[in-house]
Image (cartoon, helix red, strand yellow):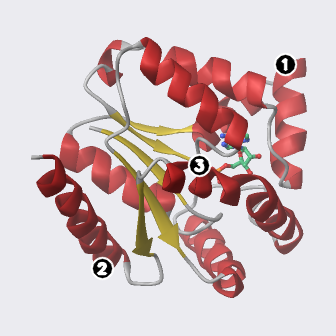
Amino acid sequence: MRIVLLGPPAAGKGTQARRLAARFGVPHLSTGEMLRVAASSGSPTGLRIKALIDAGNLVPDADVLAMVAERINEHDASGGYVLDGFPRTVGQSEALDLLLAAGDHALDAVVELRVDVESLLGRVSVRAAAAMAAGEDVRADDNPESLRQRIETYLAKTKPVSDHYRRAGRLLQVDGMLEPDGVEHAIAIALGQVASMVG
Ligand code: AMP
């Protein structure tokens, strides 16, 4: 099962991607997580990536594509994966199409979580408070200023990715404003419709 999860920052993609990955027994591939690891290395590339992430800007396509191309070719991803946070630009989605075609694969589904932009600040505050309560580090980009930039970036660069998949007849839209269990259920229904169309 090869699934892409789309949606604005703090829409709940990470939570749903983890649940989907567990359900289908495939790895959860979060480019945000991969980039945060790269950013923490302290190398010149890491520092460049960290500055972009912290300000709420995108890391250049070339860096992200190299990382994803390598990761999806690893053994544990041979049966599929859930991509969370990728593709984030139309260029990335076109490159993913080529990567998949080269491996004679196709995406099974693209799921977009639809969330009111006005609710995102509240969601980020909840996430930051939960991380703090759990004794975890609060993400450096989970603050109002970076979030504003992340939303702007999302609207300008990532929203058009949904249109790319809509045109390809692959886009499933799900109400991301429900509680996590409700969103999970809605995704399962949407995926079930795809399975019954295919099967
Ligand atoms: P996320 O954890 O998905 O919210 O991503 C956190 C940050 O990592 C984003 O705001 C970007 O700075 C960077 N990032 C994650 N995925 C990508 C991507 N596919 N392309 C470019 N930058 C990305």
Is the residue indicated by label 2 positioned so its CB lies within 8 Å of ligand 1? Answer: no
Mark toward the start of the polypeptide (3 vs 2): 3
Amino acid under disc 1: Ser
Q: Residue 181 at what x, y percent from top left?
A: 29, 75
Q: Which residue is mark 2?
A: 182
Alpha carbons under labels 1 and 2: distance apart: 42 Å
Task: Using residue 70 as the reference point, say whether residue 137 is left or right of it.
Answer: right
Q: Quadrant of ligand 1?
A: top right
Task: Using residue 27 as the reference point, say whether residue 151 is left or right of it.
Answer: right
Front disc: 3 or 2:
3
Q: Is residue 61 visible?
A: yes
Q: Nearer the viewer, residue 41 or 174?
A: 174
Front disc: 1 or 2:
2
Q: Which residue is mark 3?
A: 164
Amino acid under disc 2: Gly
Q: Which residue is mark 1?
A: 43
| Crowdedness near tag 2: few (<14), some (14–19) or many (≥20) residues, C-alpha within 10 Å | few
Mark toward the start of the polypeptide (1 vs 3): 1
Q: Nearer the viewer, residue 154 or 161?
A: 161
